[in-house]
Image (cartoon, rainbow, N blue to C red):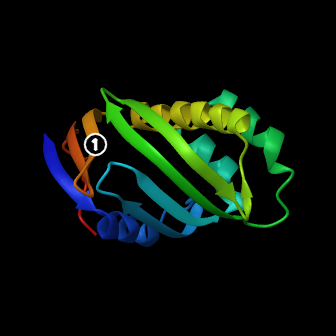
């Protein structure tokens, strides 16, 4: 059983220091606000997103969604997201307030579809990890609070 919390700085460092072959973001930053909202920014690495989807969940619906839109990216776009995330019993709850690619805000209809796909992808990633069971992840007082059960070979370390 893991009961711990991480600050914005720790999560930012963890993502940036992770040497994952298919890491889909570069120059990632996260800020967890006291009201439970989370702001993230960085640069998408377009070349590895499909490989990330395949390696982390293998979900064909998400792969098809990415294929549909990936042709519009000629370079790696900067992104900004403001959202309210939480997770209960391996299921992500996500309310996206704002999502920008470059300097463009994503319209609400597209944002709703994207949010649905992000939930499907995240749930797939969590369920793809043998022995992991997330009881809850919540944003409290500017921190991400984790309560989960993991197999003895799964480790979560503060960066």
Quarter occupied by residue 92: top left
Q: Quadrant of the N terminus?
A: top left
Left or right of 46: which side holds 20? left
Mark 1: give few (<14), some (14-19) or many (20+) Cα within 10 Å. Answer: some
**Residue lying at 49% horizontally and 32% vertically, measured from the top left:** 124
| Most distant residue in the front direction | 35
Residue 60 sits above or below residue 68 on the image: above
Give percent across and percent down for residue 36: 33, 48
Quarter occupied by residue 22: bottom right
Give percent across and percent down for residue 53: 61, 43
**Residue lying at 32% horizontally and 70% vertically, measured from the top left:** 9
Q: Nearer the viewer, residue 136 or 153?
A: 136
Quarter occupied by residue 32: bottom left
Answer yes or no: is residue 29 visible.
yes
Left or right of 13: which side holds 134? left
Residue at the spot of label 1: 138
Left or right of 127: which side holds 120? right
Give percent across and percent down for residue 12: 39, 67
Label 1 SS: strand
**Residue lying at 72% horizontally and 64% vertically, measured from the top left:** 102
Q: Quadrant of the C terminus?
A: bottom left
Residue 6 sits above or below residue 91 on the image: below
Total residue callouts: 1
Q: Nearer the viewer, residue 92 or 82?
A: 82
Give percent across and percent down for residue 74: 85, 63
Answer yes or no: is residue 58 visible.
no
């Amino acid at each position: 059983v893991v009961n711990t919390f991480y600050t914005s700085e720790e999560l930012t460092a963890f993502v940036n220091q992770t040497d994952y072959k298919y890491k889909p973001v570069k120059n990632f930053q996260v800020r967890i606000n006291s009201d439970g909202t989370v702001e993230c920014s960085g640069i998408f690495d377009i070349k590895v997103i499909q490989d990330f989807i395949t390696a982390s969940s293998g979900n064909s619906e998400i792969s098809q969604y990415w294929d549909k839109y990936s042709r519009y990216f000629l370079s790696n776009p900067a992104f900004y997201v403001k959202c309210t995330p939480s997770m209960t019993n391996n299921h992500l709850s996500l309310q996206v307030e704002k999502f920008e690619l470059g300097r463009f805000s994503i319209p609400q209809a597209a944002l709703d579809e994207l949010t649905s796909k992000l939930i499907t992808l995240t749930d797939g990633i969590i369920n793809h990890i043998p022995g992991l069971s997330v009881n809850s992840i919540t944003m409290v007082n500017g921190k991400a609070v984790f309560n989960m059960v993991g197999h003895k070979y799964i480790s979560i370390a503060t960066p």
